[in-house]
Image (cartoon, helix red, strand yellow):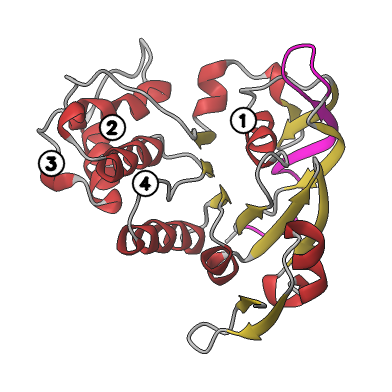
Amino acid sequence: MTDRHSEGGLRAHSITVGYGKDSPILEGLSLDVLQGELTVIVGPNACGKSTLLRALARVLSVRCGVVELDGQVLNELNQKALARRLGLLAQSSVAPGDMLVEDLVARGRYPHQSLAHQWSTEDDEAVARAMRDAGVSAFCSRRVGELSGGQRQRVWIAMALAQSTDILLLDEPTTYLDLNHQLEVLRLADRLREGGRTVVAVLHDLHLAFRYATHLVCMKDGRIVAQGVPRDIVTPSLISDVFEVECVVIEDPESGAPLVIPRR
């Protein structure tokens, strides 16, 4: 596995990011994404979690500062080169309802296609593996419009996996999923980490975030207020400061992770 403290990787240096001419959502924010870790970003609504993820993926341009990948400024990479190294599952994705699931997942192989590299057995295997890992193989021949919200979400995850990138950014990947499928997605993210990939996910469920994160980033009002191993940084005062909820924090008897119990 890659050394989490090694040089390179994905880094944001003093970035300021906003939408249009509005006031910036993030201002002077810096973050080193630890390589080979499952980093989970948490915080209240509208605190800048998704904005940060989009800036890391170059979906949003930074007004000031810089985002680097392995020491190279993201803006210096062409789109295909970036997509071969970094995958993003966006929060809201839309596909034609009449598209077959297998065809949508296959779009994840687009960055690997060129005049010199046409579709190959390797691409077929990558698509099949991605659908199997995301648990969507059973309806590969169905149309996207026929699927439930949770099924569609897993298809988008499969498309992101088909890119076969070293870094995977997941913006609220458990949206629309029931508890069983939420656990499946996060177990998959953990297996990817164990296999050497770097995974960054935005989550709202604190219990699941604290259980699966190997590195936790807590945000509030467009800034990072704490980061580290969950059991080292999650305290009642942190939860009160970030989420304005009075609570006690105990050890999860199943995982040993912090478990937040709101006070009555």
**How many angstroms separate mark 2 from mark 1 (CA)?**
20 Å
Identify whether 166 is placed above or below 203.
Answer: above
Label 1 is placed on what type of residue?
Answer: Ala
Residue that label 1 marks: 57
Residue that label 2 marks: 105
Q: Residue sitting at 60 percent across and 68 percent down?
A: 210
Q: Which one is earlier in the sequence, the residue at label 4 or at label 3?
A: 3
Residue that label 3 marks: 139
Q: Which one is earlier in the sequence, the residue at label 3 or at label 2?
A: 2
Nearer to us: label 3 or label 1: 3
Q: Is residue 146 left or right of residue 112?
A: left
Dot 2 crowding, Cα within 10 Å, few <14, some 14–19, many 20+ = many
Q: Which one is earlier in the sequence, the residue at label 3 or at label 1?
A: 1
Q: Which quarter of the image is occupied by the C terminus? A: bottom right
**How many angstroms separate mark 4 from mark 3 (CA)?**
18 Å
Nearer to us: label 2 or label 4: 4
**How many angstroms separate mark 2 from mark 4 (CA)?**
19 Å
Q: Which one is earlier in the sequence, the residue at label 2 or at label 4?
A: 2
Q: Residue sitting at 20 percent across and 31 percent down?
A: 101
Question: Percent x, y for residue 78?
Answer: 59, 15
Give the quarter of the image for residue 183: bottom left
Label 2 is placed on what type of residue?
Answer: Val
Residue 68 or 28: which is nearer the viewer? 28
Q: Are marks 3 and 2 in contact (CB under 8 Å)?
A: no
Mark 4 residue element:
loop
Q: Which one is earlier in the sequence, the residue at label 1 or at label 4?
A: 1
Give the quarter of the image for residue 248: bottom right
Dot 3 crowding, Cα within 10 Å, few <14, some 14–19, many 20+ = some
